[in-house]
Image (tube, rainbow, N blue to C red):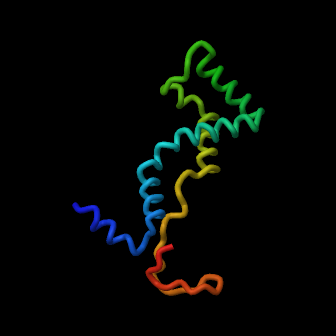
Amino acid sequence: MNTDIIFMSVQHIYTNISLFAHMKAMIFGGTNNTTLYMAMTLAALLSNPDVLKKVQDELEIHVGKNRVVEYSDIENLTYLQAIIKEVFRLYLSAQLNVPHEATEECQIQGFNVPDTRIH
């Protein structure tokens, strides 16, 4: 398929910069999530020493100090699972400002938004 046809069909909707930004988000969007969530979980634990201590105690009980955590250990680490789920809830990684199309003309705070306007 000719990429020029695709570009021409969206050129009236997007600027080159916004088109590049959306393409970059689609291509590279998933590569940063693991690092982001590991950093956010670590930051949350470091800012809550009592919670960090409970996680350390749970790890010591179920895993011990002489080996690393294995996938089979995860089902026993319920407190750690709850913390990870809470980090997912607090720090949403999904892009919320995706383009939206107005289906009918409307006014927002006195500004007229024509129908089919992409914003």
Tell me if 32 is positioned left or right of 45 in this view. Answer: left
The N terminus sits in image quarter = bottom left
Q: How many numbered circles are shown? A: 0
Q: Nearer the viewer, residue 36 or 19?
A: 19
Q: Nearer the viewer, residue 70 or 30?
A: 30
Q: Residue at x 43, y 63 (%)?
A: 19
Q: Residue at x 37, y 70 (%)?
A: 10
The image quarter in which residue 53 lies:
top right
Percent of width and height locating residue 42: 66, 35
Can you name the residue that lies furthest to the top here?
66
Q: Relative to 69, does residue 83 appear above or below in the rendering?
A: below
Percent of width and height locating residue 80: 62, 34
Q: Residue at x 51, y 43 (%)?
A: 32
Percent of width and height locating residue 89: 61, 50
Can you name the residue that lies furthest to the left here?
1
The image quarter in which residue 38 lies:
top right
Q: Relative to 106, does residue 119 appear above or below in the rendering?
A: above
Percent of width and height locating residue 64: 62, 17
The image quarter in which residue 8 lies:
bottom left
Q: Residue at x 54, y 86 (%)?
A: 106
Q: Relative to 75, does residue 21 appear above or below in the rendering?
A: below
